[in-house]
Image (cartoon, grey):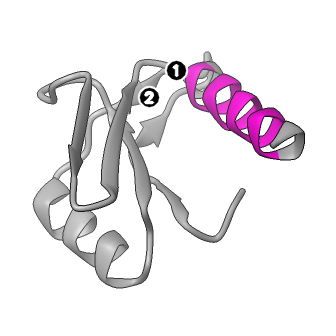
């Protein structure tokens, strides 16, 4: 995982990303630590939020997060 990407949420045995508490504090800490993109459980969030070069991606499964990360990596390699 890239150093500027953070992930949070609980993952069940089937790969579903479940909501967790303290999301505001987790997001604040991730951005303060240098994350530019954060993946969070979809429950309770808009699909994508962007502001000042920071982005929150919402996912229902771990597979969704990995698909996005792999696509982004391939995009960066071809640039």
| Horizontal and vertical percent position of residue 23 | 18, 55
Toward the bottom, the furthest residue is 33
Q: Relative to 30, does residue 55 appear above or below in the rendering?
A: above
Marks 2,1: beta carbons within 8 A:
yes
Residue found at x 52% / y 20%: 61
Question: Which image quadrant is residue 43 in?
Answer: top left
Q: Is residue 76 left or right of residue 32?
A: right
Q: Secondary structure at mark 2?
A: strand
Q: How far apart are the alpha carbons under marks 2 and 1?
A: 5 Å
Q: Which residues are magenta?
A: 64-76
Res. 61 mark:
1
Residue found at x 30% / y 83%: 32
Disc 2 packing (10 Å; few <14; some 14–19; many ≥20): many
Q: Relative to 11, does residue 30 appear above or below in the rendering?
A: below
The residue pinned by badge 2 equals 17
Question: Which image quadrant is residue 18 in?
Answer: top left
Viewer-side residue, 18 vs 38: 38
| Horizontal and vertical percent position of residue 39 | 42, 43
Residue found at x 42% / y 41%: 10
Disc 1 packing (10 Å; few <14; some 14–19; many ≥20): some
Q: Is residue 6 left or right of residue 63?
A: left
């Amino acid at each position: 995982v890239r150093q500027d990407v953070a992930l949070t949420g609980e993952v069940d045995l089937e790969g579903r990303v479940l909501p967790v508490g303290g999301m505001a504090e987790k997001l604040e800490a991730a951005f303060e630590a240098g994350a530019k993109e954060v993946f969070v459980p979809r429950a309770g969030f808009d699909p994508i939020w962007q502001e000042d070069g920071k982005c929150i991606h919402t996912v229902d499964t771990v597979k969704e997060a990995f698909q996005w990360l792999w696509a982004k990596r391939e995009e960066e390699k071809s640039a």
